[in-house]
Image: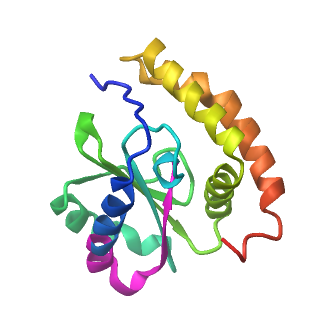
């Protein structure tokens, strides 16, 4: 059973991201156009589950599946689209997850959504604090109920995402 663990920001998350990026670049090579650190661990100062979310951008999403075996050798579990059309998703660490990889094809609207959310929280410390506090509270309230934790933060995450996408307009070239 997975425990919902939300902890204070850890500056080591940046190093963990960079180490994993090197491994992914070795596997995917020229397939990758860019790689972004996303999710709460990419937002300095926020409370987060200590899982590094990585978003590689590829030229052709259809080529990703041929790398599943190499990803498994790195400890990743390939999950296919896992509920989001046009994505390839991988988890590492089983019940004690350490990394999630969300691969999208260049031009996917999901890329903008993730980058806007990250950029908005970095640029809005009050929102970052409010969101981190909610996650911490929910983790204490539902320590072994991941579904309730996720459902509990969904409304605030949706509100922030809406504001983030509006804020992001015109900034997408800067972030």
Q: Residue at x 63, y 54 (%)?
A: 122
Q: Is residue 153 above or below residue 164?
A: above
Nearer the observer, 11 or 37? 11
Q: How many marks?
A: 0
Q: Residue at x 73, y 41 (%)?
A: 160
Q: Is residue 174 above or below residue 37?
A: below
Q: Residue at x 72, y 45 (%)?
A: 161
Q: Quadrant of residue 85?
A: bottom right
Look at the image and say whether residue 8 sits in the magenta stretch.
no
Look at the image and say whether residue 32 sits in the magenta stretch.
yes
Q: What's the image's color scheme?
A: rainbow
Q: Position of residue 172 (x, y in %)?
A: 73, 71
Q: Residue pushed farthest top?
A: 141
Q: Position of residue 40 (x, y in %)?
A: 51, 46
Magenta part of the protein: which range? 23-39
Q: Residue pushed farthest left?
A: 73
Q: Is residue 131 above or below residue 149?
A: below
Q: Position of residue 41 (x, y in %)?
A: 46, 49
Q: Is residue 7 left or right of residue 44?
A: left
Q: Residue at x 55, y 49 (%)?
A: 84
Q: Residue pushed farthest bottom?
A: 30
Q: Position of residue 119 (x, y in %)?
A: 66, 58
Q: Is residue 108 left or right of residue 35?
A: right
Nearer the observer, 27 or 158? 158
Quadrant containing the C terminus in the rendered view: bottom right
Quadrant containing the N terminus in the rendered view: top left
Q: Is residue 128 left or right of residue 167?
A: left
Q: Quadrant of residue 131?
A: top right
């Amino acid at each position: 059973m997975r425990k919902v663990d939300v902890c204070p920001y850890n500056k080591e998350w940046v190093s963990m991201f960079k180490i994993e990026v090197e491994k992914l670049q070795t596997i995917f090579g020229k397939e990758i156009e860019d790689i972004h650190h996303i999710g709460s661990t990419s937002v300095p100062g926020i409370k987060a589950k200590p899982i590094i979310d990585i978003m590689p951008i590829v030229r052709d999403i259809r080529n990703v599946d041929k790398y599943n075996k190499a990803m498994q050798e790195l400890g990743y579990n390939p999950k296919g689209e896992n509920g989001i059309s046009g994505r390839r998703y991988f988890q590492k660490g089983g019940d004690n997850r350490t990394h999630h990889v969300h691969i999208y094809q260049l031009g996917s609207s999901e890329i903008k959504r993730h980058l806007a959310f990250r950029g908005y929280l970095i640029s809005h410390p009050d929102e970052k604090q409010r969101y981190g506090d909610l996650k911490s509270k929910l983790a204490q309230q539902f320590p072994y109920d991941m579904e309730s934790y996720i459902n509990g933060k969904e409304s605030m995450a949706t509100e922030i995402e809406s504001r983030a996408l509006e804020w992001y307009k015109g900034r997408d070239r800067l972030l």
